[in-house]
């Protein structure tokens, strides 16, 4: 085998190795979720906006009134939000039984009434609908759920359409903080 053939084989092996590494990296890369329309199903691994341990601020909201609060960031045009309505309905029913967990929606809808109509149509009652849009929280993805304690500290963040295990985590976290 000549030197040129040997170099060609070595170059081929190197290109194969680099290709395999790039495919593995792409497989485990974080999902990208846009503001209005999620591109990945399930919880994202990284988000923008308040993270666990940070303080959350919303106009007119006094966290100290309740041991735990739930903030839903929704968009009427987000199909993951629509697909998640059955879970939000269960969350609202738990809220109605407990009344110690206020539910708030930060909406991208054109009007508060429009979002309230959409929630009511889906059998979901919430305490407050803010038409500030997710930008006030620095959130780029809908749906996003924040679980906030009485000090305004974010205790949990869940992004995207949740699977049943993540839905259970939300309900368990609410129960732990509210206890």
Image: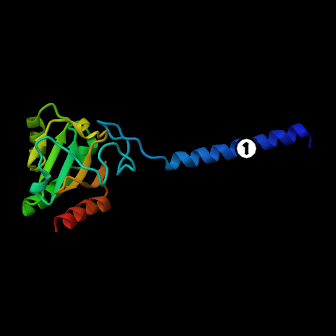
Q: Quadrant of residue 76?
A: top left
Dot 1: what SS? Answer: helix
Q: Residue 5: give x, y in percent of width and height.
A: 86, 39
Q: Residue 52: give x, y in percent of width and height.
A: 31, 54
- Coloring applied to the structure: rainbow
> In the displayed image of the protein, which residue is found farthest to the right?
2
Q: Quadrant of residue 162?
A: bottom left
Image check: 139 left or right of 15?
left
The residue sitting at 27% across, 47% down in the picture is: 144
Above or below: residue 118 compared with residue 88? above
- In the rendered view of the protein, which quadrant contains the C terminus? bottom left
The residue sitting at 17% across, 43% down in the picture is: 58
Q: Residue 36: give x, y in percent of width and height.
A: 29, 36
Q: Total marks drawn?
A: 1
Q: Residue 42: give x, y in percent of width and height.
A: 35, 51
> In the displayed image of the protein, which residue is found farthest to the top?
110
Which residue, given by chain and number where applicable, does mark 1 sit on?
14
The residue sitting at 68% across, 47% down in the picture is: 17
Residue 118 visible? The answer is no
- In the rendered view of the protein, which quadrant contains the N terminus? top right
**How many residues crowd around disc 1 within 10 Å: few (fewer than 14), some, or many (20 or more)?**
few
Image check: 88 left or right of 161?
left
Residue 46 visible? The answer is yes
Image check: 43 left or right of 109?
right
Residue situated in front as seen by the camera: 32 or 173: 173
The residue sitting at 79% across, 43% down in the picture is: 10
């Amino acid at each position: 085998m000549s030197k040129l053939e040997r170099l060609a084989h070595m170059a081929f092996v190197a290109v194969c190795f680099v290709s395999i590494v790039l495919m593995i990296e792409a497989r485990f890369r974080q999902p990208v979720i846009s503001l209005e329309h999620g591109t990945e199903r399930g919880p994202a691994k990284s988000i923008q906006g308040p993270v666990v341990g940070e303080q959350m601020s919303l106009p007119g909201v006094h966290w100290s009134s309740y041991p735990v609060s739930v903030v839903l960031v929704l968009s009427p045009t987000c199909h993951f939000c629509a697909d998640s309505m059955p879970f939000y309905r269960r969350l609202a029913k738990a809220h109605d039984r407990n009344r110690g967990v206020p539910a708030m929606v930060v909406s991208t809808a054109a009007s508060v009434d429009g979002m309230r109509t959409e929630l009511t149509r889906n059998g979901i009652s919430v305490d407050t609908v803010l038409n500030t849009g997710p930008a006030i929280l620095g959130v780029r993805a809908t749906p996003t759920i924040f679980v906030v304690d009485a000090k305004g500290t974010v205790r949990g963040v869940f992004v995207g359409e949740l699977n049943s295990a993540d839905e259970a985590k939300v309900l368990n976290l609410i129960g732990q903080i509210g206890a």
